[in-house]
Amino acid sequence: MKRLFVIFSMAALLWWVGCNPAMAAIPEDVQKLLETNECPVCILNEANLEGANLHGANLKIAVLLKANLAGADLGEANLMLSDLEQANLTGASLAQARMNGANLLNANLANADLSGAEMTQANLENADLSGANLEGAVMLSVTLGTANLREANLSGANLRGVNRSQVLFCNTIMPDGAIENRDCAK
């Protein structure tokens, strides 16, 4: 019953946000996150959280469309089912973060640390993961589309069920340790 309530709540929230795409972050939600490190099901669209210490934060089902999280510490954070479409996570630490089912469509994760992150069924389509550290990440059935993985480290990552046909690879360390240079000329 609790699971059904969470699913219904998430669907209602995503519908509501989808109907109000220009909606900015709710200031009380930003303050709550910074003070308590807890903000599940919060609206944080376009929030400026650059360099914020959000280690271990609970952001489950949060909406962070176009949020600026560059250089933020989100290590061990709960971002399951969160919407981070077009978010700036450049250089952010997401080591050991739980991101299962998260939407990172067109997100900028260049040079981010995603080592050991759990990202099963996350949407990383067209995300910039250039230079990202994904060592040991669990990426089962992740959607990558034309994600940029140039100079990324995927050593030990679990990519089972992932279509890699359109992903950009250049000097990319693959899960088996081999270097993939398929797209260096592009």
Image (tube, rainbow, N blue to C red):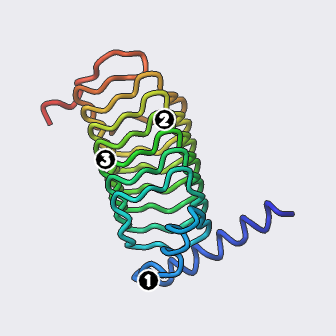
**Residue at figure coordinates x 50%, y 77% from the top left:** 18
Q: Which quadrant of the rendered structure holds the C terminus?
A: top left
Name the kind of residue labelled 2 in the image.
Val
Q: In the picture provided, is 139 more to the left or to the right than 49?
A: right
Q: From mark 2 to mark 3, how far is it between C-alphas?
A: 24 Å
The residue labelled by disc 2 is 162
Which of disc 2 and disc 1 is earlier in sequence?
A: 1
**Residue 93 - label:** none
Work out which residue is located at the far right of the displayed protein and give it: 1
Q: Which quadrant of the rendered structure holds the N terminus?
A: bottom right
**Residue at figure coordinates x 29%, y 42% from the top left:** 111
Q: From mark 1 to mark 2, how far is it between C-alphas?
A: 33 Å
**Residue at figure coordinates x 55%, y 73% from the top left:** 32
Which of disc 3 and disc 2 is earlier in sequence?
A: 3
The residue labelled by disc 1 is 23
- Disc 2 crowd rating (10 Å Cα; few below 14, some 14-19, many 20+) is some
Which of disc 1 and disc 3 is earlier in sequence?
A: 1
Q: In the picture provided, is 115 more to the left or to the right than 172?
A: right
Name the kind of residue labelled 1 in the image.
Met
Q: Residue 157 placed where, x, y %?
A: 47, 27
Q: In the picture provided, is 10 more to the left or to the right than 72?
A: right
Secondary element at image label 2:
loop
Q: Do the residues labelled 2 and 3 touch (CB within 8 Å)?
A: no
Q: Which of marks 2 and 3 is in front?
A: 3
Secondary element at image label 1:
loop
Q: From mark 3 to mark 1, how far is it between C-alphas?
A: 26 Å
Q: Residue 169 placed where, x, y %?
A: 27, 32
Q: Nearer the viewer, mark 3 or mark 1?
A: 3
Name the kind of residue labelled 3 in the image.
Gly
Asked if 35 appears above or below 126 in the picture, the reply is: below
Q: Report the front residue among 163 and 75.
A: 75
